[in-house]
Image (cartoon, rainbow, N blue to C red):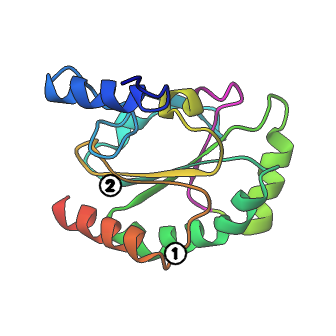
Amino acid sequence: MIMSKRFFPILLALCLVACGEYEAPAGSVGGEAPEYAAVSLEGDSVALASFRGSPVLLNVWATWCAPCRKEMPDLQRLHERYEARGLRVVGVSIDAPGADAAVHDFLAEFGITYTILRDPEDRISSLLQSPGVPVTLLIDAGGIVRWRHLGPVTSEDPGLVSAIEAALEEA
C-alpha cells in the first residue's frame, strides 16, 4: 500500500509523540509561552516573562486588519472586566516600521487602555507559527498556554471566558 503524502506528516507526528520525541511548537496549547520581548509604546523593552505570576491574554494585531478592528472593543471589555482580578491584556501590533502614528490613532479611536507592544518586524508571528492575525493566546500565571484562537475573539466567547476564569482561580 502506498501512503498518501498528506497522511505522512500526521503519521510522523504520532510516531514522535509515541516515542517521546515531539515537543509542541511555542505557543501551542499546553506548551510554554515563547521567550519574547518587544518595545512598548513608551519605548521600554517588555519581556513576556515579566508578566509571570499573572494570567496574560496576548493578542497579535495590526491596524490594517479588519477582524482586528472588530475585536478591539471586546478585548478592551475583557481588560476592564478582569484587570482588578489580575488578568493582563497585552496587544502586539505588527504594523510596519514608521506606523507609530497610525497605531496611536487606532488605539485612541477604540479607547484602548491595556498594554500595547510594537513588533514591526513581526517576530511574534514566527514564534507562534501563526498564519495570520488576529491571533490570541491565554497564558496562565506559570507561563503555560491554556487557550489559543486564530481570528477575532469576543468578550462573551464561553470558551475564552471559561479559560480566563480558570486561569484567574489558579493564579
Q: Which residue is mark 2?
A: 55
Q: Is residue 19 left or right of residue 130?
A: left
User: Closer to the N terminus: mark 1 or mark 2?
Assistant: 2
Question: Rounded to the nearest whole Å, what is the CA distance between mark 1 and mark 2?
Answer: 16 Å
Q: Residue at x 80, y 28 (%)?
A: 97
Q: Inspect the magenta stretch and tell me whether residue 25 lies in it.
A: no
Dot 2: element: loop
Frontmost residue, 91 versus 7: 7
Report x, y in % for residue 41. 66, 41
Which residues make up the magenta segment? 113-123
Amino acid bearing label 2: Pro
Kindly report which numbered mark, 1 or 2, lies closer to the viewer in this rendering. Answer: 1
Report x, y in % for residue 100. 80, 39
Amino acid bearing label 1: Ser
Residue 61, numbered label: none
Report x, y in % for residue 70. 72, 67
User: Compared to 109, does 52 lie above or below?
Assistant: above
Q: Residue at x 29, y 36 (%)?
A: 32
